[in-house]
Image: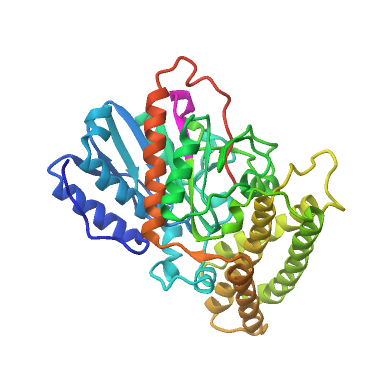
Amino acid sequence: MRRCALPPLHRYPTVDELAARAAALAVRSSGDVRLRRVGVSRAGTPLWLLSVGRGARQALVVAGPHANEPVGGATVLRLAERVLADPRLTAGADATWNLLLCLDPDGLRRNEGWLNGPYTLGRHFRHFFRPGFLEQPEWLPDGADGAALPETRALLRLQDELKPFFQCSLHGVDVGGAFVELTRDLPGLCRRVAHAAARLGIPLELGPYDTLYWPRLGPAVYRIPPPCPRDLAAAITEAAVESTWYHPQRHGTVTAVVEAPMWGVAAVADGSAPADRDGALRTVSHALRRDARVLEGILARVRPHLEGVPDAARLLAPVDDYLLVCPGLADAWDPDTADPLRPLPPLSTAHLTALRIAGGRIAVRTAGLLHQLVTGAGRDPAGALPELDALIDGWCAGYRDDCGARWIPVARQAEYQARVVLAAFHLAGARSGESDWGSQPVVPMHRE
């Protein structure tokens, strides 16, 4: 095995650090690693692809599809070193690894206020940024031909150029546990995911909010179902539109979405029956309605003072998206208002914990974005900052003290994600020649 090690990475890499580390690896590798630009972002930042190996079979790993989920950058650097050091992953598998360093570099730059640490929930959410639904580059709400974002078009071109047998999208969970979503089953992956999580002390999420209605392939592994009708509210809350996940399926590609948590919560791994399902659901739904009303009131006070504030529109877009979905979510979760034609599935303690975390996530993210809007304005005529600070502190304390959220070091997050990617790569490679490999139905974009 060869070694071409970079200095250890104990925090999330920034956009510039990703490019610099990848370039250093390419220079040191004597031609085994190539770095090329495959597109540019809306702000003109290069989209860099790091390729390792010279095999005929292509694997594509996409980091940074969501601006607030930076673990993928650390993971692709780790994967590059591991693949370069082990010829069984390249020449031995007749494979080339193609690592897209960051799909949304502009969004990642907006999160640099918390990337370097210290890693606290309050710091994270006060500097959190995730663009509105229509500015997230993995989505294809108007299909591939209608892709509006240059980042999206670059990824689509890359998929059609490479025709990968395996694609992996690297995601992060702010609070919760680890899980995987697949466009088709990879038998044996559940066991490997569980082993990696156990070795690294990362909780498996047995009932993620994202996959509430989705087929379960095994513990913490889920099958992405066909899309729902296309409307914005549904798209933000569930699989609803086409995406770059299934675009390469015409080439026989299997896609794995690998979620790694920043702050782990042990209760998301509790598959036991809850003591009072309906009582817990009422608590979560009532809290979401209450929090949404409070945040709507703050927004109404703040919005008139945002004229001329730089980037106010980009921060307001996700605020409006989050507040848009709150009433429907609360009604869907509340046993007294839920739609009888679409009942909730059987719920474990893990599911109820995930719903509590999800409701709090919408609230604290919205408050964090409003906090940035007010501080960006340079003044607070509405007197909103003290209230926002108190709300953020309270919701973060709920995660920390009531849910037991505990920070997982970046190196462990990236190592878990890398191990799952490698496991899925091996299993997909073993199945990619099967006659029915490319014949299954298309799959939708996942919300988070």
Please tell me in which quadrant of the rendered image residue 74 appears: bottom left
Above or below — where is 13 with respect to 214? below
Colouring chosen for the image of the structure: rainbow
Foreground pick, 199 / 3: 199
4 displayed left or right of 159? left
Foreground pick, 426 / 158: 426
Is residue 405 part of the magenta span, yes or no? no
Please name the residue shown 31% across and 46% down the image.
79
Q: Position of residue 12 (x, y in %)?
A: 37, 61
Please name the residue shown 28% across and 28% down the image.
93
Is residue 255 part of the magenta span, yes or no? yes
Above or below — where is 86 with respect to 416? above
Q: Position of residue 282 (x, y in %)?
A: 80, 59
Please name the residue shown 52% across and 29% down the image.
185
Residue 102 in view here: no
Region rendered in magenta: 248-256
Please tell me in which quadrant of the rendered image residue 427 appears: top left
